Image (spheres, rainbow, N blue to C red):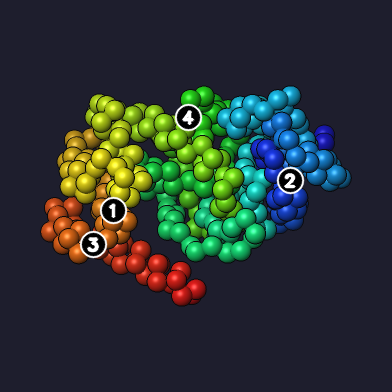
Amino acid sequence: MDKQPLVTVFMAMYNGEKYVAAAVNSVLNQSLQDFELLIIDDGSKDNSYQVVKAFTDPRIRVLQNEQNCGLYRTRSRGVAAARGRYFAILDCDDLAYADRLNAPVKFLEQHPDHAACFGLSDFIDGEDRPLPSQPMQAGAHAWVDTLSFFYNPFINSTLVIRTDVLRQYDYRAGYEPTEDYDLMQRVVTGHKVAILPQKLIKYRLHQQNSSNVQSAKGIAGNKRVYAELLKGIVLGGTPQETDLHDALYRKVLAGTPYQLKDLESWLLQLRNQDQNRYDTTLFRRAIAMEWAKLIYSNKSAGNMLRFVSSPLFSFRGLGYFIFLMGRTIKNKVGI
């Protein structure tokens, strides 16, 4: 390929034989056709490499790691090898909708002050069956920046980022398998990032997801990110604070050393923290949503009473709780 493609679509592959052909075809069927598909096989032990090498489309470029290097190193190699002005990701088990590239690239072309954007997704299981919807947030930079303090709001397979910006940051060791959260937390601190309201992919949830397979490492990686975030608002980022923030992220308190009152106190401490990092109104809105999610995940008559009597209560938080309950009902009845 002599001409520089507009977009590099990067696909890291490890033992993806079952799903990778469908993922590749979903990229080839994009409405925006000015791209290269860069696939790096990370030492697969199945026939993944043979599957992708069977494709004859000249836009596909396949590299191999000599041995299994892990996702962070494979992604870093992809960043270095990319030829496109924009860098997009699609995991080898996900499926892209036809406008997966066109919508975010169009947004970035029209918003040169933004470094990256993401989209939303539908969810499927390992057999392509639709799964219940999950709450996702779209929004402009200030809201996305605020949300990312509390959790990772970014669906990695919807990312489009300017390649030159990505190379300034790159993935870091020690955060696997949440290196994407660490990366985007650093990017969103220095650049504008948006989450578009369009659904761009079908995200596959199954037991082989790296976030499932490496959950213990993911907790450790998240806590490293939390420690840095907390220092950014003039808190210490101590182990106790990062443990509390991690419990807040996970929401379900059963089996943890924490009770609802502990996380209520933590949210109050965050709300009352004198900080200039985030927009105060948006930060308090996010805290109200986190309080609502905590109650939703730990529903009981006593907790509902605590919800409405807490200093954290707001009608916005109540509205979000009602939204979560309504979504659960719709999922159960298949609406």
Of marks 3 and 1, the one in the foreground? 3
Left or right of residue 42, residue 108 in this image? left
- Sequence-wise first label, 4 or 3: 4
For label 2, the residue is 17
Residue 277 point in image, percent of width and height: 29, 35
- Spatial CA span between label 2 and label 1: 39 Å
- Spatial CA span between label 2 and label 3: 44 Å
For label 4, the residue is 175
- Spatial CA span between label 3 and label 1: 11 Å
For label 3, the residue is 300
- Sequence-wise first label, 3 or 1: 1
- Spatial CA span between label 2 and label 4: 26 Å
- Mark 2 residue crowding within 10 angstroms, few (<14) / some (14–19) / many (20+): many
Q: What residue is rendered at 30% in x and 39% in y?
A: 245
Q: Quadrant of residue 315?
A: bottom left
- Callout 1: SS: helix
Q: Amino acid at mark 1?
A: Leu
For label 1, the residue is 294
- Sequence-wise first label, 2 or 1: 2
Q: Amino acid at mark 2?
A: Glu
Q: Amino acid at mark 4?
A: Tyr
